[in-house]
Image (spheres, rainbow, N blue to C red):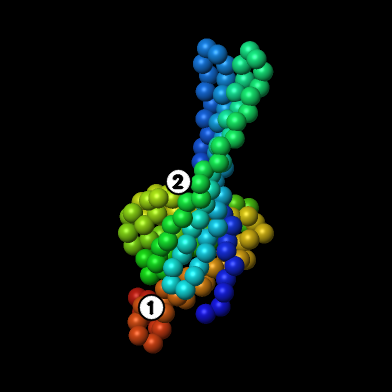
């Protein structure tokens, strides 16, 4: 099997604006990671950065916290679909799994689904990764590497 480079991704996490008697705080999150396809498994690794900016009577204070690296391994045969969505402007890679808890440890995932934001310049790389996932899923579907026929064919 050919080696595929890791695909960089981001996850959207909403920030917060807080107002109290002492001042205003703005909290912003940035989650970024890499998606690896290795043999018969997908490995997602990510890290998060939280930037807190507080404005009060003494001035502006900024605090940056970084989380440890998180990892998640999912067997390729657990993936029911891998699709590139969003067109040219906002490309996203959507992965759907057979199990609702397949992506539970990944922030911002929904039951059985995770949507990874990718850069425009990585769209072709994401297309190649989707094709590789689909071919590896199909290879395990039936002996001989043939995927089952679609209805109506």
Is 66 positioned to the left or the right of 104 in the image? right
Visible in this render: residue 7? yes
In the picture of the structure, the residue carrying the numbered disc 1 is 140
Q: How many marks?
A: 2
- Residue 144, position in %: x, y? 39, 87
Position of 2 relative to 43 (above/below): below
Residue 108, which numbered label? 2
Is 67 positioned to the left or the right of 119 in the image? left
Given residues 56 and 9, the one toward you in this image is 56
Residue depicted at 38% across the width and 78% down the height: 140
Q: Quadrant of residue 50?
A: top right
Residue depicted at 39% across the width and 67% down the height: 75
Given residues 107 and 95, the one toward you in this image is 107
- Secondary structure of the residue carrying tag 2 is loop
Report the Cα–Cα distance between label 2 and label 1.
29 Å
User: Callout 2: few (<14), some (14-19), or many (20+) C-alpha neighbours within 10 Å?
Assistant: some
Is 119 positioned to the left or the right of 68 in the image? right
Residue lying furthest front in this view?
68
- Residue 9, position in %: x, y? 56, 54
- Secondary structure of the residue carrying tag 1 is loop
């Amino acid at each position: 099997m050919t080696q595929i480079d890791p695909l960089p991704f981001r996850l959207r996490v909403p920030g917060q604006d807080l107002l109290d008697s002492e001042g205003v705080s703005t909290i912003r999150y940035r989650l970024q990671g890499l998606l690896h396809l290795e043999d018969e498994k997908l490995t997602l690794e990510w890290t998060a950065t939280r930037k807190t900016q507080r404005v009060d009577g003494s001035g502006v204070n900024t605090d940056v916290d970084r989380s440890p690296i998180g990892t998640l391994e999912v067997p390729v045969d657990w993936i029911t679909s891998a699709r590139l969505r969003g067109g040219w402007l906002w490309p996203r890679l959507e992965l759907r799994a057979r199990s609702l808890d397949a992506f539970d440890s990944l922030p911002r995932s929904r039951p059985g689904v995770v949507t990874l934001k990718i850069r425009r310049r990585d769209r072709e790389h994401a297309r190649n990764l989707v094709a590789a996932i689909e071919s590896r899923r199909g290879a395990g579907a039936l002996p001989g590497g043939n995927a089952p026929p679609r209805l109506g064919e």
